């Protein structure tokens, strides 16, 4: 899409403009996500989620009809404004769950995110420019000939519309305010229900929101810092992968076409369901969320170090075109087996790390009335990181493939840097106490002296 806009002087400059596109979303999200989180603490989760879905539906369609880089950049900025749902939904899920099912419930959020990212990326690669890629179905379409990237955006907006309808008719408010009548209890009243019974009113005691200063304890800041570094490493490589996969093997890439890139991302959607629903909840119940966080980080390092070496196989395949078709096919199969194995490691690491950090942030909220702020703060930290990560990875990638420098300053640079960041986060994670394994909002609040450390 960036290439079609004609803003990049050379193919090697595409990553720079693609990074700007990614960065624009994160800038506007960082400026608004705290507002959405705190607003949901006051007016409820449902209205904020509905507004976010309406905005997502609109900008999804608009992005597909962009004909210039500037227009696309503005639409992505608008998309970030409505991206507060990422933080608000974490609060809603935490309020629905209890100690018996919290790990499985919270695992649904990164499941939908990872599944959507994998399948959505696949849809973007497979259904973009359908007149050329799918001539049997769309070869005569004047609409998709003029707007070659509209079809996958329409498919995405359809999914957003389904979420909007579901939210309007099936999603009930999860934030129960003090002394607010519970919907289930009022509806369940019968002739035998005492008129003055307390069951018509929730037993939630009045809870006052804590001040921002009291919420940002040393422990919370420590976890937020590890979260920011982790997000930086993952975002750099996640944004780089499509560019790396499309880059010519002579420049350190894989030389894949858009459809192959989409398939390489889309197939991971199958893997993420099993890991998220079956593997992670069992590990979390047995070992705790902190253990899962550390194991997830440890999976990322070999994936990051190994991925750029695939370019050597792709380069060999490219230079073996004159040999037998069987030899080329065998090498291609080997490359795809290794690629899918590494992508499986990537999704396993991402699932365990991000699910765990979500649960740790939620577990550290002292009361349910502070969930919106805590999750909003986490999303803010991630959004700020995502402002810089794409431009850093894109710029470093362009620089590294333009210069003939030795390892690790060649095409391995971004991958190696990300592996180092993950190693730092893994080391920092051993300074996080086991108290993050429990949901603090439901734990008895001990009386402590003012002199005691907030970290405790």
Image (cartoon, rainbow, N blue to C red):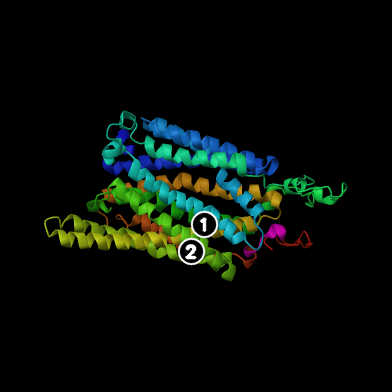
Q: Which residue is mark 2?
A: 296
Q: Quadrant of the C terminus?
A: bottom right
- Residue 6 sits in which quadrant? top left
Highlighted range, magenta: 437-442
Looking at the image, which residue is at 75% across and 45% down? 187
- Callout 2: few (<14), some (14-19), or many (20+) C-alpha neighbours within 10 Å? many
Check residue 59 for magenta coloring.
Answer: no
Task: Spot the residue most to the bottom.
Answer: 286
Q: CA distance from mark 2 to mark 1?
A: 8 Å
Check residue 440 for magenta coloring.
Answer: yes
Instruction: Please name the predominant secondary structure of the magenta segment in the image.
Output: helix
Q: Quadrant of the N terminus?
A: top left
Residue 44 image offset from top left, x and y in percent: 67, 42
Q: Is residue 160 above or below residue 255?
A: above
Looking at the image, which residue is at 39% across and 65% down? 302
Residue 269 image offset from top left, x and y in percent: 42, 54
At numbered mark 2, what does the secondary structure look like: helix, strand or loop? helix
Circle 2/circle 1 CB separation < 8 Å: yes
- Callout 1: few (<14), some (14-19), or many (20+) C-alpha neighbours within 10 Å? many
Residue 182 image offset from top left, x and y in percent: 75, 47
Looking at the image, which residue is at 57% across and 60% down? 104
At numbered mark 1, what does the secondary structure look like: helix, strand or loop? helix
Can residue 164 be seen in this snapshot? yes
Looking at the image, which residue is at 27% across and 39% down? 136
Give left or right: position of 270 versus 368: left
Residue 424 image offset from top left, x and y in percent: 48, 62
**Residue 354, numbered label:** 1
């Amino acid at each position: 899409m960036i290439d079609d806009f004609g803003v990049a002087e050379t193919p090697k400059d595409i990553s720079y403009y693609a990074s700007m596109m990614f960065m624009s979303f994160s800038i506007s999200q960082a400026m608004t996500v705290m507002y959405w989180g705190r607003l949901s603490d006051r007016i409820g989760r449902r209205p904020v989620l509905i507004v976010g879905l309406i905005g997502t539906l609109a900008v999804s369609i608009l992005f597909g009809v962009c004909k210039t880089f500037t227009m696309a950049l503005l639409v992505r900025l608008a998309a970030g404004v409505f991206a507060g749902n990422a933080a608000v939904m974490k609060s809603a899920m935490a309020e629905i769950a209890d100690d018996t099912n919290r790990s499985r419930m919270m695992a649904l959020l990164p499941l939908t995110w990872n599944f959507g990212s994998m399948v959505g990326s696949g849809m973007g690669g497979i259904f973009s420019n359908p007149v050329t890629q799918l001539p049997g179905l769309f070869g005569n379409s004047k609409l998709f000939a003029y707007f070659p990237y509209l079809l996958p955006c329409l498919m995405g907006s359809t999914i957003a519309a389904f979420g909007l309808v579901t939210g309007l008719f099936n999603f009930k408010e999860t934030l129960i305010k003090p002394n607010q009548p519970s919907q289930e209890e009022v509806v369940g009243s019968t002739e035998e229900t005492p008129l003055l019974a307390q069951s018509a009113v929730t037993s939630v005691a009045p809870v006052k929101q804590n001040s921002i200063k009291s919420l940002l304890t040393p422990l919370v800041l420590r976890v937020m810092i590890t979260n920011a570094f982790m997000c930086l490493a993952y975002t750099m490589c996640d944004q780089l992968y499509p560019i790396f996969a499309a880059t010519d093997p002579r420049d350190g890439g894989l030389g894949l076409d858009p459809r192959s890139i989409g398939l390489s991302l889309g197939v991971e959607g199958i893997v993420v369901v099993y890991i998220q629903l079956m593997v992670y909840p069992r590990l979390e119940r047995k070992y705790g969320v902190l253990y899962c966080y550390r194991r997830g980080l440890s999976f990322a390092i070999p994936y990051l170090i190994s991925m750029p070496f695939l370019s050597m196989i792709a380069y060999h395949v490219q230079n073996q075109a004159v040999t037998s078709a069987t030899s080329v096919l065998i090498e291609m199969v080997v490359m795809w087996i290794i690629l899918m194995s590494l992508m499986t490691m990537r999704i396993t690491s991402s699932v365990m790390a991000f699910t765990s950090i979500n649960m740790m942030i939620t577990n550290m909220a002292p009361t349910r009335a502070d969930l919106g702020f805590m999750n909003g703060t986490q999303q803010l930290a991630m959004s700020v990181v995502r402002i810089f990560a794409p431009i850093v990875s894109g710029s470093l990638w362009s620089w590294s493939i333009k210069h003939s420098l030795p390892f690790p300053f060649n095409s391995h640079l971004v991958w190696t840097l990300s592996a180092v960041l993950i190693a730092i986060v893994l080391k920092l994670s051993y300074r996080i106490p086991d108290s993050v394994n429990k949901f603090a909002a439901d734990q008895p609040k001990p009386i402590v002296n003012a002199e005691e450390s907030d970290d405790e």
